[in-house]
């Protein structure tokens, strides 16, 4: 069975609690990513997504100089490198998240994203089903 260590990205850009939202956004732009893990003394303490910046900073009319702590999600859902892809896919579907930080002893060692599953030839049908649930909204969306 495939483990997360086999598909995770290990070169992960991070920010610290000393950074501000502007610095996080610049790092997202430069690295073409939608999430930046936040670390403190090598321990994962949160994540900021592009959606977090829009909803918790811009939409609330907070300045780009806002501290990352004010915008980051500190409720962390993580996996370890030994987690199976099936287990990770199930967690992602249950939590409705597209990215999972990979940690060992609280230290960030990688990240796995929905795209990592898509580019691999996973034969685990349950993982494919779970991942498809992430992309389906709970209710139909109305667009104007």
Image (spheres, rainbow, N blue to C red):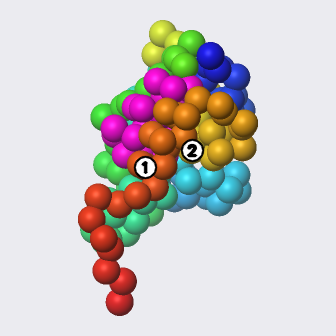
Q: Residue at x 31, y 34 (%)?
A: 75
Instruction: Assess disc 1: are there few (<14), some (14-19) or many (≥20) residues with their C-alpha within 10 Å of its C-alpha.
Output: some
Quarter-of-image position of residue 117: top right
**Image vertical order of residue 66 relative to residue 59, above or below:** above
> Was residue 89 drawn as part of the magenta stretch in this picture?
yes
Instruction: Please provide percent x and percent y for residue 62.
Output: 33, 65
The image's mark for residue 134 is 1
Q: Is residue 109 left or right of residue 55?
A: right
Q: Is residue 109 left or right of residue 77?
A: right
58 or 66, which lies in front?
A: 58
Confirm whether residue 90 shows in the render: yes
Quarter of the figure that contains the C terminus: bottom left
Task: Give the residue pinned by disc 2.
Answer: 114
> Was residue 53 drawn as part of the magenta stretch in this picture?
no
Q: Residue at x 34, y 38 (%)?
A: 94
Q: Residue at x 66, y 33 (%)?
A: 122
**Image vertical order of residue 128 relative to residue 142, above or below:** above
Marks 1/2 in contact by CB < 8 Å: the verdict is yes
- Residue that sits furthest to the top in the current view: 105
Report the Cα–Cα distance between label 1 and label 2. 9 Å
**Segment tinted magenta in the rendering:** 85-102
39 or 52, which lies in front?
A: 52
Q: Main secondary structure of the magenta part?
A: helix
Confirm whether residue 108 shows in the render: no
């Amino acid at each position: 069975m495939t483990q997360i260590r086999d598909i995770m990205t290990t070169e992960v850009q991070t920010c610290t609690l000393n950074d501000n939202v502007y610095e996080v956004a610049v790092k997202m732009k430069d690295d073409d990513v939608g999430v930046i893990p936040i670390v403190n003394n090598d321990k994962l303490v949160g994540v900021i997504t592009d959606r977090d910046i829009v909803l918790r900073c811009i939409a609330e009319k907070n300045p780009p100089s806002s501290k990352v702590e004010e915008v980051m999600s500190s409720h962390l859902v993580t996996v370890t490198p030994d987690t199976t892809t099936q287990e990770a896919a199930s967690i992602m579907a249950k939590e409705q998240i597209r990215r999972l930080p990979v940690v060992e002893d609280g230290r960030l060692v990688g990240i796995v994203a929905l795209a990592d599953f898509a580019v691999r030839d996973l034969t685990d049908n349950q993982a494919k089903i779970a991942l498809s649930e992430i992309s389906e909204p709970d209710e139909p969306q109305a667009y104007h």
